[in-house]
Image (spheres, helix red, strand yellow):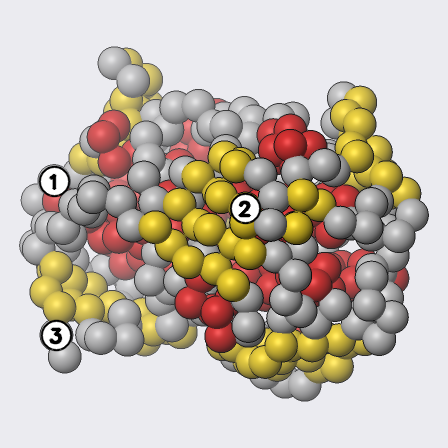
Amino acid sequence: MDKLLISGGNPLQGEISISGAKNAALPILASTLLTDETMVISNVPHLHDITTTMELLGRMGSDLMIDERLNIEVNNSNITELFAPYELVKTMRASILVLGPLLARYGRADVSLPGGCAIGSRPVNIHISGLMAMGADITVEGGYIRARAKRLKGVHLTLEMVTVTGTENLMMAAVLAEGRTILDNAAREPEVTDLAICLNSMGARIEGAGTDRIIIDGVDSVHGAHHRILPDRIETGSYLVAAAMTGGNVKLKNTRSELLDAVLSKLREAGAKIDIDDTSISLSMPNGRPRAVDIHTSPFPGFPTDMQAQFTAMNSIAEGNAVITENVFENRFMHVHELQRMGADIKLEGNTAIVNGIKRLKAAPVMATDLRASASLVLAGLVADGETEVDRIYHIDRGYETIEEKLLQLGAKIKRIPSQQTRMPVSKARIVK
């Protein structure tokens, strides 16, 4: 497996561009199943999860063309397999997002249950119960969700908990349902809104995305369209935290500040000077070392759980003490034990981490346990004395496009030790230049 070797001590300086958001690209790729006309999706990040999704679509019969900038053209006029196998779904829980579109357009879908997740339980019962309320006949057998329906019917659903993928799956299914569907307690994340924008450009009739009530008036069919993926707010936040930790001065281009107001507020509280315009965010640290900040994670527009690990790393070298409360996932402090190997003074009490900031961390071999935990360990390595070795970085490659190249552009001392493994090619995808 690949590893990253990081020599700490360099303040990050310079400019980089932010990639498209993985968590928007995945449901939008799934949404292409709603039409047999060509979809063009731009600003797609070059990530392993994207490759997995393309592999899944390719196995179903999608014809995909990719240019050298990873703009993806998808045509689903020849879908033959309405099946998402365990071998792919187990590597990426977002594969469940093909369930709603397949059922809405084709009337059937066999999708593997995603299985367990390192950061906590993310059940799919809301997806299933919502589709059943819309008239689907669903059984779960042999580890697969087997769904059948003639035409789904619009219904008023109050989701029992806020779920991003649940909201997205049901919203996509409702696009081709008969009548009006109302989703109350819907997720408000920007990625949900981006999906709604894409669907509306295809001819869907969706209102309220970005609020906790989404209204979808079903249509008979949708058409092809071109959609540009919004910037990745978590990648943006991660590099801003990296700059704050190292006492750096960076400018992040091709991003949008309104996507991460809660994160920017906490960075300012930590002592960062932040300047924003329509497409960029600049951060500097006039006083060097950040101040400790308390964190309470919650669904958007609250502080994102996907930024908790990065702020835990920052608080570990900040001035003062901080209390970090994780309210979204029950097992999202696995990075703490690895940070402790680097000398961090952190005490865990249930869903709370109490962090006593120290001036410097010490390099040590550490192991990534999930996507955002791996990012926090890379950030810790940037400020540690010595050379930090981060193992199992395939987690990072699921969500950060060429992280070592971008950090090198900002002056970090970092290199990847490549493995001998190769990735599975994308079925039926053609690379065009």
The answer to whether 38 is drawn above or below residue 106 in the figure is below
Kindly identify which residue carries mark 3: 432
Secondary structure under tag 3 reads loop
The answer to whether 258 is drawn above or below residue 99 in the figure is below
x 63%, y 71%: residue: 12
Kindly identify which residue carries mark 2: 388
Report x, y in % for residue 252. 59, 76
Q: Nearer the viewer, mark 1 or mark 3?
A: 3
Report x, y in % for residue 349. 80, 22
Q: Nearer the viewer, mark 3 or mark 2?
A: 2
Horizontal relation, residue 357 to residue 247: left or right: right
Is residue 12 at least partly visible in the picture?
yes
Residue extending furthest toward the bottom? 277
Report x, y in % for residue 356. 86, 39
Residue extending furthest toward the top? 142
Packing grade of label 2 (10 A; few <14, some 14-19, many >=20) is: many
Give the camera-side residue of 245 and 136: 245
Residue type for callout 1? Glu
How far apart in space, not on screen, are marks 2 and 1 (Cα)? 45 Å
Residue type for callout 2? Thr
Secondary structure under tag 1 reads loop
Residue type for callout 3? Val
How far apart in space, not on screen, are marks 1 and 3 (Cα)? 25 Å
Query: What label sits on residue 81 in the rendered view?
Result: 1
Horizontal relation, residue 344 to residue 208: left or right: right
Q: Nearer the viewer, mark 2 or mark 1?
A: 2
Give the camera-side residue of 306 and 238: 238
Image quadrant of residue 25?
Answer: bottom left
Secondary structure under tag 2 reads strand
